[in-house]
Image: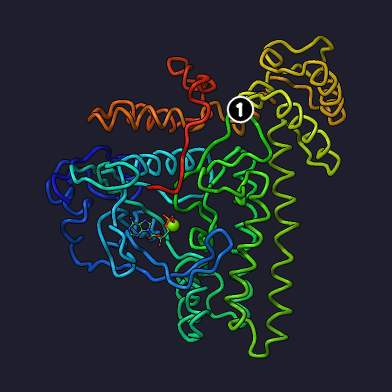
Amino acid sequence: MPDPVLIHFNDALADELGLAHQVLGCEALIGMLAGNSAWPGYAPIASAYAGHQFGAWVPQLGDGRALLIAEIATPAGERREIQLKGSGPTPYSRGLDGRAVLRSSIREYLCSEAMHHLGVSTTRCLSLIGSSEPVQRETVETAAVVCRVSPSFVRFGSFEYFFHRRQNEQLATLAEHVIEEHYPHLIGLPDRYARWLTEVVERTARLMAQWQSLGFCHGVMNTDNFSVLGLTLDYGPYGFMDRFRQHHVCNHSDYEGRYAYSAQPQVGQWNCSRLLRACLPLLAEDTQAALEIGTGIFERYAPVYAQAMMRRWADKLGLFEARESDTELVNGLLSILQRGKNDFTRSFRHLSRLEALSDVPAAGIREEITDLEAFDAWIVDYRARLRSEQNTDDAARAERMNRVNPKYVLRNHLAQRAIEQAEQGDYAELAVLMSLFRRPYDEQPELESYAEEPPADQCSIEVSCSS
Ligand code: AMP
Ligand code: MG
């Protein structure tokens, strides 16, 4: 990569990884993070995988523009894989250029860190390198490389790859590797594959509940973008919803709305069914027996998701107990927000100002609500629900709610502003966002405007698969 420039370095993550600070600013490090030189002691690896893309089977994908460059142990004794994205062609590039543009690299860099600090399971980013190298997309843009960090980048599609090729031995080798490295409590157990898959299914269900509760839409939930560790992986045309819409589709290339907000939980489940199908040969020699075990594992998804989701909605409403009947309360609020085109993140954040014992319309909560009649009726039910569990310490509840209802999410217009500046060589806004999203649940009065809805002309910034 010509003229690599270090645009941002994630010092906090470098500290967690135990990477010596002195290396920052040193030419050799920038060369490694740009993919121009190898990490000492390692030869880079690109992985093969397959996947279901928008429901269609694609037998040959792989790290077309990603390279695993090292595996390190953190001071806490955990293993982390270091991967570059956009460092050039690999054996799996399928004729594409192996590059990523600055725009999409900034989006991945910002969002993976924002998600981490929101408490969502995710891969992380260590560095962002820019370059003068031109890259052709819809227009000519410039290339960039992000350095991603994760315990593992193995995907559902990694297993589908070997299953499709009837390479059961490799399938088992990969499963053993994942278990040994990442599910060590299962090592050597006779039913370890079934238990491991059960954990993957449960983690995926919980991840979907995390996404839903934050209004996060992934955009490209293909099985090659699903992690066997239940991490959010591959940030492309994602989006945090501004105005709440059940059928919000964040990816403008997703013409059929396959990955709409409302569809995400079911897609997560369907992806698990693809993983389980690929792993049937691991579950039992007899096909029927394997199918029965696989079906049993699959059936874990729905109850785990339902329970996790119920708990998260209850937390967002500041409730101690999550009750089945709260679904009605939640849906009531969501439909008020949807009908009134109200902001998802702001509306939940404002709810913490409610006084449980008062009967007057709640100040500071209703100002932005459009359908006030329905909302005031909803508040009556909500207050009754709070009182039913003696949940009347308003200050304590507000504090709890503000730890789960973020003040700041990475709205598209915020990322877009940082991108436009960076494309002019000014990285200040990117640094502001990186610092802001370290504390998304805290009030940061000097950055109040970052919690606002997008200006009217920036509500529909288009993000697509082009990256
Ligand atoms: P993505 O939509 O980024 O998840 O990519 C889907 C697949 O296409 C993956 O196998 C990528 O490695 C590959 N891919 C996407 N863009 C490129 C590119 N510019 N060069 C090489 N491979 C790519
Ligand atoms: Mg991908």
- Quarter assignment of residue 24: top left
Residue 91 image position (x, y, % from top left): 29, 70
Q: Is residue 1 above or below residue 201?
A: above
Ligand 2: image quarter: bottom left
Q: What is the three-letter code of the residue carrying label 1?
A: Asn
Q: Residue at x 48, y 50 (%)?
A: 122
Counting labels gives 1
Q: What residue occupies the far bottom of the structure in this picture? A: 286
Q: Nearer the viewer, residue 144 or 8?
A: 144
Q: Is residue 212 above or below residue 432?
A: below
Residue 53 image position (x, y, % from top left): 52, 61
Q: Residue at x 59, y 42 (%)?
A: 249
Q: Any atom of ligand 2 within 8 Å of the CB at mark 1?
A: no
Residue 325 image position (x, y, % from top left): 86, 40
- The residue to which callout 1 is attached is 402
Q: Nearer the viewer, residue 99 or 76?
A: 99
Q: Residue at x 75, y 13 (%)?
A: 362
In the rendered structure, the answer to whether residue 290 lies left or right of residue 424 reads right
Q: Is residue 292 above or below residue 99?
A: below
Q: Is residue 278 above or below residue 273?
A: below
Secondary structure type for disc 1: loop
Residue 310 image position (x, y, % from top left): 74, 44
Q: Residue at x 25, y 66 (%)?
A: 44
* Colour pattern: rainbow
Q: Residues within 10 Å of mark 1 (few under 14, many from 20)?
A: many
